[in-house]
Amino acid sequence: MLGIMVRAEPLTPAKTAELRVQIRANFFVPDPLPALDAQTHRRFAPAPGVAAEAVTYATQLGTRVPAILYLPAPRPKGGRIPAFIVVNGHGGDKYAWYAFFTGIAFARAGAAVLTYDQAGEGERNTKRQSGTREHDRLQGDAVLARRLGGLMITDVKQAVSYLASRPEVDATRIGAAGYSLGSFVLALAGAVEPRLRVCVMAGGGNLDGPEGYWDKSKPMCQGLPYRSLSFLGDRPAAIYALHAARGPALIWNGRKDTVVNMPQTQDDFFEDLRARVGARRGAAGGGFDFGFTDGTSHRPYWLTRPAVLWLERQLDFPQWTEATIRGLPETHIGAWAQSHGVPMDRLYATEEREGGTRAIGEGVPGYERESLSVFTPAEWEQRKSVLTFEAWTAAARAAPR
């Protein structure tokens, strides 16, 4: 089945289901998904108006995901609340500034927010370090690259399962945002995860054709997994048509984002892609929204006003309205990080990149790294055999091909 070109026929419900099965099989995504076996390890208060839980839940091949769940405190009156998942960029994890800032800002808006360690980072790293890009050390194994893509997709799907299991969460209002590598992961995961109400791809989402940027990008986590989808034919159109069958999607970028080749994929690129998605769907409309912030580069744009307004229309944050969002103050992230001693990747801390982000809201405190760890170092040592990327890699290499 894999590697055979799929004829570009309109996506009926049956064809949508068939393609989702093919994509999941291509990436070795377990079917059914592993039992969650979710565990709450501790509770804490990271900021005024916010409660948090340090949790783990199962993912592939007997390994577990360490995560932080942020919740509004007190919980808004009037029923269940929306939920939001942060899918990290390269080297990012639950310790990343944007994961923490999203957790605080969106929890204060009345949503549950789940941030988790990417494979090979944070408590899934053999040294409990961030920014290691451990999975990039794997080379040349196309099957293992597909399995890695499948792990990242499974991580998203299990995050959805975890949030849907929470009694305070409205399972019909779960959204996700992916940044950089996370935009690629969410583009794939959102295509095969119909439980996601809404997806935002930032610092990416500009999926292109054969031998383009995404085919030639980091091979293990992007290039080889993307190439493996050649059986879809027009891969970007098929992927975003599957998103359209799921629900709303937004792609938002900085016009000057050279990290992901954005100067070569501007409005005409996305309008053409929208037309192809419409043809693939056999329906009017492009199936996703897109936009740019002028004069800026690589940033997690779901924290900025245009994307937050779009999210409000989809998720209906209990403590926000469009009018209140338009009036909210902004935080200059570079200045905030410096004043609170929050670390940023020096390559991205510039004004044009993440450092210049104007994030919605103010009064977000700083944080100590260990405050966002699920386990103490001693506890982690006892559990690392089910947490680390190294453990997953050993199991993946031994798995049937």
Image (cartoon, rainbow, N blue to C red):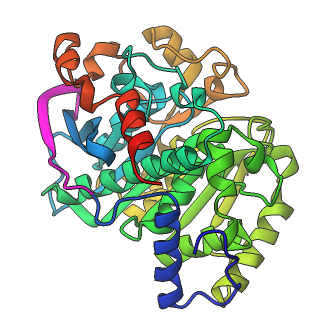
Residue drawn at 72 percent across, 54 percent down: 206
Picture layout, residue 240 above or below residue 302: below
Picture layout, residue 178 above or below residue 124: below
* Residue 319 rendering spot, x and y as whole percentages: 30, 51
Residue drawn at 73 percent across, 41 percent down: 217
Inspect this view and state whether residue 281 appears.
yes
Picture layout, residue 27 above or below residue 371: below
Dividing the picture into quarters, in which one does residue 241 lie?
bottom right
Q: Quadrant of the N terminus?
A: bottom right
- Along the line of sight, which residue is nearer the eye, 311 or 300? 300
* Residue 251 rendering spot, x and y as whole percentages: 63, 56
Dividing the picture into quarters, in which one does residue 393 lie?
top left
Taking the magenta stretch, the answer to whether it contains residue 90 is no
Left or right relative to 329: residue 55: left
Left or right relative to 272: residue 374: left
Span highlighted in magenta in the image: 34-50
- Along the line of sight, which residue is nearer the eye, 282 or 192? 192
Left or right relative to 401: residue 136: right
